[in-house]
């Protein structure tokens, strides 16, 4: 697709708006707390749209429709469990973390882990390093998505698309911190939701309508309109592991869970889970339906996808190009996709900045470092993380969804057990948390890689395992936590009371 | 309905309904503390 002047203007206006938010937000930054948790001042809608923007990633537009294009209705569960991850995060992590963070002054979730497990150095460092690794994996997927859109829109080489995307996102994130990320996400999420609600029905209508799409898919392969596949990927066991992966894995992802520390009032948690689920769920369902519509249009010969390994990720772009033959609208749609991707990318970079500057530098290496130095280091790390992932994204994977799920799988295996056990089980110990986190990280990275290259280990063919690979490493992490905790010294009652540890969500 | 088998409507619709009811229950019963 070739660009014209209107297209360039639309994209430039969007980018300038994001840079403007960064410049405005930078004036509000007085210290590290302002930069990393926006002075704990986020209101109801800013918080909800920040959560949606953080969870709605490159996969939300390109990957979701790409997967729907490839495998049909059995993949629809993604559209329930991803929006539900926001509610899970708020209910099972957010309420308690927020209540404790107010008095304990947490900046990151690593502050909580260090406090709860009485491990100011070891667990904090391991947690931060693990967080940086999983955030980088996830970030590569986001930059790949931005590059796909810019390549499609401007017909420019991948490296140039990556440079443009990286520079814009990095500048407003580095100068404006979470204030910029939150307000940019508010605008990006509104653009994403309104854009999808308007454009998805047009694509589905152009493909012949919802009934026609489903009837056609059923004619091609009856399994494409069933709620699950008979076996293998998207069989019932796989879907159950998929539910845990998306709902719990995304909820405990460092870039998502840290948002709960920035809300102004805990009462916002009352209706936030329902509102986020309804808004984001509606957009996600429509996106999946556009993937189905794209599959029908490709099979009917309306358009052909490019001859690239990740062709499925292009289906929504080609769908919009054919159903709306007005170039200015393509540019608007490109802004919608960019908004979805950038709203996750900026939060990820800020999270990596926080883990490096606050958790590793300030809390472990240089406790006497002044606030100005920590703030400067945060900004430097944001820039470095962007450069690092830009280089990694030059060779995008076959399907965006696979890389992003791998990132979520590692997050689930690494963080879910220490967090859930820490919040709800008084018997969980420092050594148990260290074992669970280390084993979860190492086994999920190993299983994920073996699954991706379809290799065997110890007689197990990882290309044919019935569950998502993260389910196995998640179970290993649970076993490590329980066994090691039972064998080691308990956490003091003082700390358990301070961190409100116990089988309740909030003290009544 | 919608060109889909009943099992798809019931399974997907049922899970969505259960989720919405659960989140409404959470909203009605949550009394957050600060």
Image (cartoon, rainbow, N blue to C red):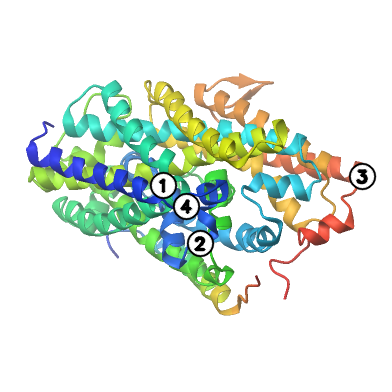
- CA gap between label 1 and label 4 equals 32 Å
Q: Earlier in the sequence, mark 4 or mark 2?
A: 2
Real-space CA distance between mark 1 and mark 2, rounded to the nearest whole angstrom? 15 Å
Locate the N terminus of chain A by quadrant: top left
Tell me which chain the residue with mark 3 is part of. A
- Closer to the eye: label 4 or 2: 2
Residue A38: x and y in percent read 50, 54
- In the rendered structure, are the residues bearing label 4 and label 3 in contact, judged by CB atoms less than 8 Å apart? no
Q: Which residue is mark 1?
A: A26
Residue bearing the label numbered 2: A41
Q: Earlier in the sequence, mark 4 or mark 3?
A: 4
Co-location on one chain, circles 1 and 3: yes
Give the image location of residue A423, x and y in percent.
Answer: 73, 56
**Residue that label 3 marks:** A489
Distance CA(mark 1)–CA(mark 3): 46 Å
In the image, residue A214 above or below residue A255: below
User: Quick one: SS at disc 4?
Assistant: helix
Label 2 crowding class (10 Å Cα cut-off): few <14, some 14-19, many 20+? some
Chain identifier of the residue bearing label 2 in the image: A
- Sooner in the amino-acid sequence: mark 1 or mark 2: 1
Disc 4: CA contacts within 10 A as few (<14), some (14-19) or many (>=20):
many
């Amino acid at each position: 697709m070739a660009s014209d002047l209107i297209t360039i203007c639309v994209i430039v206006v969007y980018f300038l708006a994001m840079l403007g938010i960064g410049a405005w937000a930078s004036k509000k930054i007085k210290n590290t707390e302002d930069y990393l948790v926006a002075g704990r001042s986020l209101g109801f809608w800013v918080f909800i749209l920040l959560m949606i923007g953080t969870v709605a990633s490159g996969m939300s537009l390109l990957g979701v429709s790409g997967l729907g294009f490839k495998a049909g209705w059995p993949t629809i569960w993604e559209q329930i469990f991803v929006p539900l991850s926001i509610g899970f995060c708020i209910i099972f992590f957010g309420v308690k973390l927020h209540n404790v963070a107010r008095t304990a002054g947490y900046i990151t979730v690593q502050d909580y882990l260090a406090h709860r497990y009485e491990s100011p150095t070891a667990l904090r460092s391991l947690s931060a390093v693990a967080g940086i690794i999983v955030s980088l994996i996830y970030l590569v997927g986001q930059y790949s998505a931005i590059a796909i859109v810019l390549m499609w829109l401007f017909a420019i080489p991948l490296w140039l698309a990556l440079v443009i995307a990286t520079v814009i996102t990095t500048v407003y994130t580095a100068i404006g911190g979470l204030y910029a990320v939150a307000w940019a996400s508010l605008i990006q999420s509104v653009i994403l939701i309104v854009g999808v609600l308007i454009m998805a029905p047009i694509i589905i209508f152009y493909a012949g309508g919802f009934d026609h799409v489903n009837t056609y898919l059923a004619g091609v392969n009856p399994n494409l309109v069933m709620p699950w596949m008979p076996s293998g990927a998207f069989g019932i066991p796989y879907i159950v592991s998929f539910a845990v992966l998306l709902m719990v894995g995304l909820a405990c992802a460092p870039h998502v869970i840290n948002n709960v520390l920035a809300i102004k009032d805990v009462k916002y948690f009352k209706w936030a889970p329902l509102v986020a689920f309804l808004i984001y769920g509606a957009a996600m369902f429509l996106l999946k339906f556009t993937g189905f519509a794209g599959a029908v249009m490709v099979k009917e010969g309306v358009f052909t996808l490019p001859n690239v390994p990740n062709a499925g990720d292009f289906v929504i772009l080609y769908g919009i190009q054919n159903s709306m033959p007005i170039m200015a609208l393509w540019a608007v749609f490109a802004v919608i996709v960019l908004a979805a991707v950038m709203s996750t990318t900026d939060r990820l970079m800020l999270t990596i900045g926080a883990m490096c500057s606050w958790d590793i530098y300030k809390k472990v290496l240089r406790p006497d470092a002044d606030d100005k130095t920590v703030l400067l280091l945060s900004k430097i790390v944001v820039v470095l993380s962007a450069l690092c992932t830009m280089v990694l994204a030059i060779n995008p994977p076959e399907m965006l969804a696979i890389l992003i799920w791998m990132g979520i799988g590692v997050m689930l295996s690494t963080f879910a057990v220490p967090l859930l056990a820490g919040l709800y089980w008084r018997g969980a110990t420092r050594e148990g948390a260290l074992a669970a986190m280390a084993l979860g990280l190492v086994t999920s990275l190993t299983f994920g890689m073996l699954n991706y290259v379809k290799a065997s280990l110890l007689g197990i063919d990882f290309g044919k395992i019935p569950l998502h690979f993260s389910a196995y490493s998640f179970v290993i992490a649970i076993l490590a936590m329980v066994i090691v905790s039972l064998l080691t010294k308990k956490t003091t009652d003082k700390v358990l009371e301070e961190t409100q540890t116990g089988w309740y969500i909030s003290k009544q | 309905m919608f060109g889909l088998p009943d099992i798809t409507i019931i399974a997907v619709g049922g899970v969505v309904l259960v989720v919405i009811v659960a989140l409404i229950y959470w909203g009605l019963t949550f009394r957050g503390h600060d």
